[in-house]
Amino acid sequence: MYLSGGIRVRTEGRYKQLYNDLKNFVFLDMHEIFFTCAAIGYRSGKRIPLGKSAEDRFWSDTITPHEFAMFYAMVAELEGMSCQSLMDAKSVIEVVEEYANAGMEILLEELLGEYVIETESGPVLDKASCDELPKIILAHIYDRSLSETN
Amino acid sequence: MIIQSIQLENFRQFRGKQQIEFDSHKNKNVIVIFGENGRGKTGIFRALMFCLYGEKKLSQDASVQESELYLVNTQELQEKSSQGIPVESCVTLDFLHEKQKYKLRRSLLGILEDGKVIQQSNGVKLTLWDDEGNSSTEKDPKIVSQYIENILDSALREYFLFDGEKIERLTRASTEQRREISNAIRKLLNIDTLEKVMGATERLKKYLNRELEKRATGERAEVMKLQRLNEEEIEGKKNGVESLRGELEFARLEKVDVDKKLEQIREIQDLLDKRNNLEERRSNIEEEKNDILRGMKERTGQTALLLLQSTANNVFNSIDRRKQAHEIPSDIRRDLIDRLLNEMQCICGRHIKQGSEAYARIIEWRNRIPDNATEDLTLNLWRDLSSARDRFESIEENAVQSLTKFGSLKNEQREVERELERLREKIGSSERADATKLDAHRLAIENKIGKIEYELTVTKQKLDALYDGKERLAARRKRIEDQEGIRDELTRRVELVEQSHDALLKIHNDFTAESRVSLGDDATRYFMDLLDDESRRNLKSICVEEDYSIQVHDRLDKPFLANISAGQRQIMSIAFIAALAKAACGGVELLEMPLFMDTPFGRLSHEHRKNLVQQVPHWCTQWILLATDTEFGEFEAKELAATGTWQSFYILHAEEDGSTNIHKTTVEDGLGYICQRG
Amino acid sequence: MSEIHIRILNKLKDYPNEIQEYVESAFRLAATLPEVALAEELKAEVRKILKEKEIE
């Protein structure tokens, strides 16, 4: 069903605190973080299946129509523009989860590494250095988008 | 006294026999003695004091031990000591006083022993000539002293030397200043004896009252006890007043100090304002940055849409192409074709057979058409992608705008920080720059001053009340004594002594008041002579207050001392010392004593210097000006030369062995010498 | 007698004789005595002045 609600979107367990922190300091909500990571992962052509420690992160109801449309577009593009593949929203989400997983890893590698502290349960934001993080991430996304359109 | 010559022999820096001559021109009465510091200018005044009074110390030597004050020339001492020969140091003064001629010679013997200088008096000789030219000699120090005291009281000798320190001391309202003036007046009036008699009478009064109290009974005893307590309280309050005055003065000085600092701050007020503005701008920038960051937080998620522009475009275009090709939405819905196949009917209604070409074509058509759900999804997707694409431009614009704005704010912030740092360096230490703290401190001091002034008023009021009480108690006692017919001998003694004490106190106050007024009047005349035109318009008089401090009044008779400049203060001080000198001379218009002025020009403007140089020669019979090259330059020399009062010019030269040589030149040569030095 | 003494005595002209006498004696003694000793001497002077007055 188009724009299905009621689906639990998952991420790696180790990113749980990071998602929470990013929601407090940089983004408005979980779905935005997820979308951004998915976009980064897709644009880099990298996808990493979720492991055993994957956890539910948020409900698909919160995903905006535009975000959902982009997810569909990603999968349609992957499946040679076949819209048939989009009929099962759950499997669309599952594909996007893998891209988001990779996207987070890329984001950590390329940008967030300086701003997080590694703990046993996973990376957490170093609050002391987060003052300008919204700007830093926005700039990063924008710069990436410039190379994406070139 | 008019000095004719002063001869120094091995005295202080002056090795061998050296002389300063004072010619007796009525109109040319100024001698300039010119030399760098340490060359012996004050030494000449010292020679005069030694010769007249046998005094080794001047008032500026207060903290120096007499044994450390060497009058004998050290170079001569060192040379002669190796031969075991003592050195005679002497000063000979030739002078006229009230038309009588005198020659006074006083000497010391000095020897260097085990590195220590030992000096001892070597006698004095006074020769006088009468009208007929007959001379007589006196060698008894006591008699010589009497002669000299009659010419100039030794207690007053210091008023003929105007040295920089003395001038400075009198410029500042301080306990020192008041003490100096009160001592001067006491010396001038010669009221030491009066004060001694008052002291003794006070003692006697206390003693007699104690005796009386012991013997008194009943109400009288009670009143006497109250009187004693009253006296003690009065004493206590008088001490209180003195101590409060001291505290007040200290607080006032503190305030002056703070005002100076605030003045410095005013000079840097521009910088401080700039700093405050920049600090405000800095905090505004921080706020603006935070606003932008908040906005960015709201936009970051959307901005990620830009990452999938090409994907969105590809898929959109693909669907759009199919739409253009009328593939979607399909003309006929798939479920309709399914029905046709079930009914084995063509759309035109003709029956079709399975396996036939028509049948195959219908199958093919069916396969081409997406199912409804998929078609719906595709169309919805197309719609959402379309609206998403419409937003790309504005999302990009917003992102660019906020990033650019943030960047320029950061640059501005860096610039502001740099500027603040530069200002911080210019402004200096934080204490100096903290006007707010200083203002608060000043306010605290002002409050303190207010409190002390109030306390002072209250204490004075209490003192007045105590004096009233004293009168009432005295009256009460008299009434009792009259009633009880107590007029015993002891009581009468007490009465006599008390009345005598009161009389002496009144006389003392009258004398000192008269003296203060007279000093004030003279000081005012000298002051007006010396002031520049503008100051003369604003300032009216100098007066000596009851507490012996000096006050200057403006033309509206308001106290104005706190507002006069340093130069005006110096003039005030010089005028005052001249008034003291005049009083010391018995109040005559023309001071018949030489006035020594040691570097008096200090902080004076050109006009003041000119006035000084023009006026002082008319104040006294001889003006000896001791000057350094920084004080007495071309301007001063030319002004003095123009007055026609300049008699001679002496230069104190430093010799190789460290001693000083007195070198006399003419005024013309002296003028040339000074102009050459530039 | 010094000038100041003359001036002081002039100022006392309107005061009773005993006071003038007291002051005169005090100044005379003060020429040679310090304050404490002067106070001692004046004890006797005061008695003397009052006795003379009585006799008058």
Image: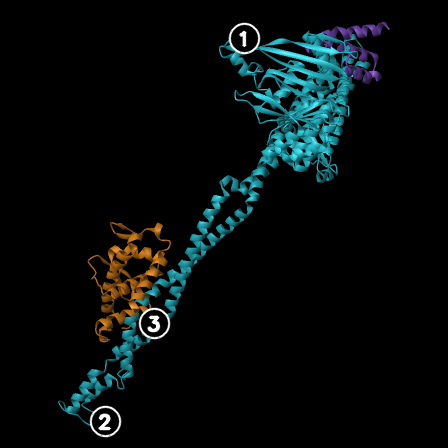
Chain colours: A orange, B cyan, C purple
B110 or B264, nearer to the observer: B110
Which chain letter goes with mark 3? B
Q: Which of marks 3 and 1 is nearer the N terminus?
A: 1
Q: Which of marks 2 and 3 is in front?
A: 3
Rounded to the nearest whole Å, what is the CA distance between mark 2 and mark 3? 42 Å
Query: Depth-wise, is mark 2 or mark 1 nearer the camera?
Result: 1
Q: Residue B632, how many percent across, how many down?
A: 63, 32
Residue closer to the observer: B606 or A111: B606
The answer to whether residue B370 of the structure is visible from this angle is yes
Q: In this view, does B51 lie above or below A131?
A: above
Residue displayed at 83% across by 14% down: C16
In this view, B464 is above or below B111:
below
Q: Which amino acid does label 3 sit on?
A: Ala
Q: Residue B388 carries which label?
A: 3
Question: Considering the numbered disc 3 on the image, is that residue within a helix, a strand or a loop?
Answer: helix
Q: Which of marks 2 and 3 is nearer the N terminus?
A: 2
Give a yes or no on whether discs 3 and 1 share a subunit. yes
Q: Nearer the viewer, mark 3 or mark 1?
A: 1
> In front: B16, or A133?
B16
Provide the residue designation for mark 2: B348
Secondary structure of the residue carrying numbered label 2 = loop
